[in-house]
Image (tube, rainbow, N blue to C red):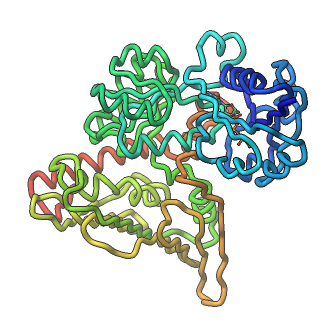
Amino acid sequence: MTRVITYGTFDLFHEGHYRLLQRAKALGDYLIVGVTTEAYDKARGKLNVVDSLSTRMENVKKSGFADEIIIEEAAGQKFNDIKKYHIDIFTVGSDWVGSFDYLSDYCKVVYLERTKNISSTMLREKNSRIQRIGIIGTGRIAGRFIPEAKLVSGISTQGVYNPHAESAARFAEKWEINGYTDLEEFYEAIDAVYIASPHETHYGYIKSALEHGKHVLCEKPMVLKRAEAKEAFAYAREHGLVLFEGIKTAFCPGFSKLLGIACSGTIGSIRNVEACFTKLERPESRELTDRVYGGSFIELGSYVMLPILKLLGKEYEDIRFDTIKGENGLDIFTKVSMKYPAGIATATCGLGVKSEGRLLIAGTKGYIVAEAPWWKTAYFEVHYENPGEVEKHSEIFLGDGLRYEISDFLSTINGINSSEFKLTRGESVALAGMMEEFMRGREEDNCGWVSR
Ligand code: C2G
């Protein structure tokens, strides 16, 4: 008798799960299915699990393929289960290829091809809480999305679009999703898009996706003109669609906690915010050679402006950009100085100059400091007049951190809880406006310009 084991969360039980269990059962005579507990899913960084453990076990049972259902409670359990249950074959979907090779010393390890398409008919019939998402663009950032989206329950990454057939095919093969070069066909297969194409193409794709009734999560900077941002948000709102600008810091739990403490009055009234993010890029990189859409501010400005807009608001009185340019005229280092009625702020970003990446929030009673990489906020301190009085705060930040914005995007679509306050439309519009002002000043070679 061949004994097979497989594991999973099996949340919002769908076609992919069904087909996996069917083929797992066919590998042998007796199938054991391990269903993860809420605590284990939390520990491994899986977000948005909707169904309770008992519902998920019930759904596995209903599939009719499991001879025995067990609970998976912790990392390392698989190794013990294989011995305990005299397992011959361990199997799991091919999105895990390589991850469980270490078990092959104890049993056969089989990766079954994952189901690429969760069909719309099945979703309509069974539940509509799974959002089928498609990616526009095949670059580095697009590649980061998939492993993170896998950890958000209720998202099924179905396909990728790139007008260049070869790039679409290469990306689709690597991530085992469908590749599209026809935009209409692509929209047909999905409910929402993640836009990770070059900056200058964002606006066009946002418009076309919204016009096709798709929710949109767009990489930062979402658009580079205030009017475009306003128009896109107005359209989305009018048509009941969710449009999110993907500045991941805004959605990470540590940053929310930091803002909560900063705004609680603990450090008094906030008078100064200083944010710095520098990242040295190779001189031949796109960021340092794209004469129109490259440069330090367009690349990193969204991160450094975020805490300033969040804490001091959008109503600044003055803004001044000072830049150091490279030989090709692109800004390699930018300092933004802002004046508010009762505060000041500086945002610094660099691609060709390195500095200490830090977020410093000064108030009338104390200050908050978060060291680099504060944009993936996992730790910060609150200091007061007495240097001995320091409050230390840690918060979870897993993987690449994209999962938090994906999770918030999903729950906003599903109307479970709106996370739009984490990065408001007004803030995104203000950011687009700053990008626009900056680009205009840079074009006019007007270093140190004051635009208000
Ligand atoms: N699956 C699939 N096709 C999909 C989606 C999922 O074949 N479109 C497979 C997964 O590869 C996995 C099983 O269905 O083998 C359960 O998927 P999940 O519920 O997402 O669980 P997962 O996070 O993959 O847990 O210990 C847990 C296991 O390591 C896997």
Q: Tell me which image quadrant ligand 1 sits in.
A: top right
Location of residue 409 in the rendering, given as x and y in whole percent from the top left corner = 56, 36
Q: Viewed as shown, does residue 106 lie left or right of 62?
A: left
Location of residue 55 in the rendering, given as x and y in whole percent from the top left corner = 85, 28
Q: Viewed as shown, does residue 53 lie left or right of 227?
A: right
Image quarter hosting the N terminus: top right
Against 44, residue 192 (above or below) is above
Q: Viewed as shown, does residue 189 lie left or right of 225?
A: right
Residue drawn at the location 67% of the way across and 77% of the way down: 391
Q: Is residue 421 visible?
A: no
Location of residue 390 in the rendering, given as x and y in whole percent from the top left corner = 65, 82
Location of residue 366 in the rendering, given as x and y in whole percent from the top left corner = 57, 78
Judge by depth and name the residue closer to the eye, 79 or 310: 79
Q: Is residue 304 visible?
A: yes
Residue drawn at the location 61% of the way across and 41% of the way down: 96
Against 3, residue 352 (above or below) is below
Judge by depth and name the residue closer to the eye, 335 or 349: 349
Against 58, residue 251 (above or below) is below
Residue drawn at the location 30% of the way across and 45% of the way down: 433
